Structures are given as C-alpha cells and as structure tokens.
Image (spheres, helix red, strand yellow):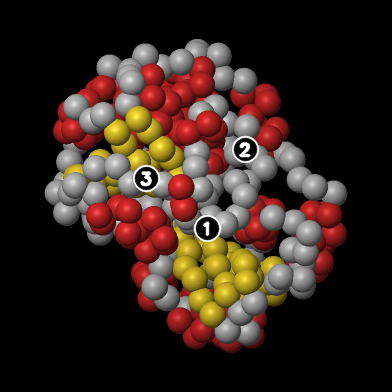
Amino acid sequence: MSSSSSAAIAATLASATAVTICCHVRPDADTIGSGLALGLALDRRGVDVEVSYPGTEQLPASLAGLPGGKLLCAPAQVVGHPLVVAVDAANLERLDSLGETFTAAQTSIVIDHHASNPGFGDLDLVDPAADCTAVLVLDVLDDLGVELDADIATCVYAGLSTDTGSFRWARPASFRVAARLLETGVDTRKWSRILFDSHPFAWFSMMSGVLASAQLVPTACDGEGLVYAVVDQQALAGMSWEESESVVDTIRTAREAEVAAVFKEGEPGVWTVSLRSKDIVDLVPIARAHGGGGHRQASGYSDTGTADEVVARLLESL
C-alpha cells in the first residue's frame, strides 16, 4: 500500500496507453459512475480503455443508460492491461473474479472512499471524508487537466447523488461539486427519476410483503434499537437484485430504531446484509466482525445459511 494524492495518480495515468478499470461486484451507481467517468476521460485522451465488473448479472436498469456504456465489457472479455484501476472497492475481495486481473497488473491503483479500505494497490487514493468515490475520480480528472463535459459529469452525478441519499446526508463540499456538475448540462430531473423513482410494478408487491414482515428489536445495540427485514429469493422472483436495495432506505425510517438491517438472498443460502445507522452507532466494527466493512453509518457484509441463522448471527453480535 502506498497512500497517494490525486495528483500522483493523475501523473501515472497521464503516461498510460492502455488501462483496465475494475468496478466492484453487484455494481452500484458510485462504482459504475466512477468507472465510466474515468474511462470516458481516458478514452478521449486516446487511451485504450476497458471497464468491467465481476459476475454474470446484467447491469442494473438504472445504470444501463449512463454515458460511456460502450466501454463496458464482460469479465471474460477483459484483456487486463498493464495499468489497472479499482474504483469504489473497499477490498480486493469486492473485485471477485477481477481480483486476479488487478493483482497481475504491472501497476495497480485504488480509488475509494470506504473507511474500512486497507489499501491494496501500488497507489492508493482512499479518503473516507469523501461522500463518494466519484468525487475522488473527479479530483484525479482535474489534475489530469480533463475538461468536464455533460457526459463525464452525469457519471459523477450518478455516484454522488446515490451515495448521499439524494444529498440528504451530503457534506457541504458535495453541494459545491453538484453545482459544478449541473453547470455542464446534467439532466438532473431525468437522472433523479431513473436512479430513485423508477421500479417495475412487481416491486410494490415485494415491498409490501417485506415491510409487513419487518421486525423491531428495541433492546438491540445497547437499547438504541434495531429494525430488520428479510428479502429472500422468492420475494425477488422476476426482479433484479437491485430492486431490494431500496428496502433498507425505507425501514431505516422507523423512529424506534437507530440501526436498520436488510438481509438479501442473491442465491439459495447466500446473503448480502446491508446495515444503516442514523447517528450514534458506528457500523464499521459490526460489519468487520462479520467479514465486511464500509462506512460509519452505511456498511455491509456477506453470510451463508438459512434466514434464521444469518439473522441470529447478527443479533448475537450486537
């Protein structure tokens, strides 16, 4: 690990002729937006660029229309250039099958904002004070002398707006960045609708069933309270995994609970657990205890077993 500045990473990228950009497994708007923003900028400099994410899932519908989609390729098609950049991956495991591509690179770069990131590249730009990885990518592009246009700005906006909950918990610096992005012509009405207010009709049935079965544990977290919900494979039948992401933002509004948890079953017996807190509880130690990580108020981890087993393990650790 070598803690690096955006200027140092820009200097390394400036001399590159070919770059592979790796996004994390089950990609969200921050990792894809960061990857495409960086990819578009390098492509316009004449660099041979490929952007990929691990897994066989289709890109979430909300992200499929982002500018720069032509740069995306399936993991099996990745060449693996001498310089590889990981964006928004808190650790090497988050790159899944692309981890081999990352470690095989002559030069590896990490750009990320997760507090739990230990630094796993030759050059690491890890800043937990940043609201999202996309703004760190923007810093790199500024140091590269890239002219910010609407396409690149739209990709950055996708990462910034989603990781701040549509700016509900954004720091002051993020509003200044947002103003700069909008000045390039980003269509915020369009992208806010796509990113936050668009679901298939089946989503309503899924949400009604999941919310009806949500549980409140007032004594958890030293009496601060926990609310949790389980989204199993049956609940997600006919929908993509991204549709379960909105559940945690709904149940976290319970007044009686400081912490919210959502257990999402991607494959039989394989779960992704999303954790959110409002103010008091630091979630990073909890997530790390289960092999995960993230931020103080937004973390997660993976687990296996029955729904009852994975829920019990979390409750025992609180």
Taking the image as shown, residue 18 lies to the left or right of residue 201, namely: left
Q: Name the residue rendered at 41%, 47% in the picture.
A: 78
Q: Which residue in the structure is indicated by mark 3?
A: 79
Q: Image quarter for residue 137?
A: top left
Q: Position of residue 233 (x, y in %)?
A: 71, 70
Q: Secondary structure at mark 1?
A: loop
Closer to viewer: mark 2 or mark 1: 1
Identified by mark 3, the residue type is Val
Q: Name the residue rendered at 62%, 72% in the picture.
A: 267
How far separated are the C-alphas under marks 2 and 1? 16 Å
Closer to viewer: mark 1 or mark 3: 3
Q: Is residue 296 above or below residue 315?
A: above
Closer to viewer: mark 3 or mark 2: 3
Q: Nearer the viewer, residue 226 or 265?
A: 265
* Mark 3 surroundings within 10 Å by alpha-carbon count, few (fewer than 14), some (14 through 19), many (20 or more): few
Taking the image as shown, residue 300 lies to the left or right of residue 249, namely: left
Q: Which residue in the structure is indicated by mark 1?
A: 55
Query: Mark 2 or mark 1: which comes first in sequence?
Result: 1
